[in-house]
Image (cartoon, helix red, strand yellow):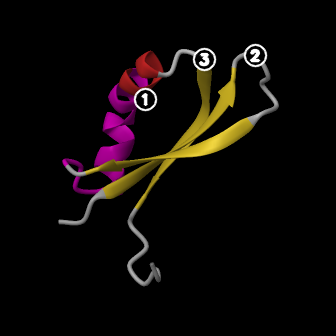
């Protein structure tokens, strides 16, 4: 089973216009649908570890199979 990726768009609390993407690989989530259901708990845990950042939006996606490394 492939890992699903949770993609967060996060912004600085002190400068809300400064945003970036954070990528979380979820090994224990089997599908994009399961990722979306469980994403709230992953986002809450991530947010506790990064108090200077605010999660603005997120989405789940399957890994890029044909991606060149």
Boundaries of the magenta span: 28-44
Residue at 47% over, 83% down: 68
Closest to the observer, 32 or 13: 13
What residue is disc 2 on?
14
Q: Secondary structure at mark 3?
A: loop
> Magenta-highlighted stretch: main secondary structure?
helix
Could you give the CA–CA distance between mark 1 and mark 2, rounded to whole angstroms?
20 Å
What residue is disc 1 on?
43
Point out the tag, 2 or 3, that comes first from the N-terminus.
2
Q: Quadrant of residue 31?
A: bottom left
Mark 1 Cα shell of 10 Å, populated few (<14), some (14-19), many (≥20) = some
| Left or right: 40 as drawn, with respect to 22 | left
Could you give the CA–CA distance between mark 2 and mark 3, rounded to whole angstroms?
8 Å
| Left or right: 21 as drawn, with respect to 14 | left
Give residue 32's position: percent from left, percent from top: 36, 55
Q: Secondary structure at mark 1?
A: helix
Give residue 24's position: percent from left, percent from top: 40, 46
Closest to the observer, 43 or 15: 15
What residue is disc 3 on?
52
Residue at 77% over, 33% down: 18
Q: Is residue 39 magenta?
A: yes
Q: Which is in the foreground here, disc 3 or disc 1?
A: 3
Q: Which is in the foreground here, disc 1 or disc 2?
A: 2
Q: Is residue 50 magenta?
A: no
Point out the tag, 1 or 2, that comes first from the N-terminus.
2
CB of mark 3 within 8 Å of CB of mark 1? no
Figure quadrant of the C terminus: bottom left
């Amino acid at each position: 089973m492939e890992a699903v990726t949770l993609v967060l768009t996060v912004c600085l609390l002190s400068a809300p216009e400064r945003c970036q993407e954070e990528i979380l690989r979820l090994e224990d989530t089997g599908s994009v649908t399961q990722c979306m259901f469980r994403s709230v708990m992953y986002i809450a845990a991530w947010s506790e570890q990064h108090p200077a950042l605010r999660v603005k939006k997120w989405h789940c996606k399957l890994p890029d199979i044909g991606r060149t490394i």
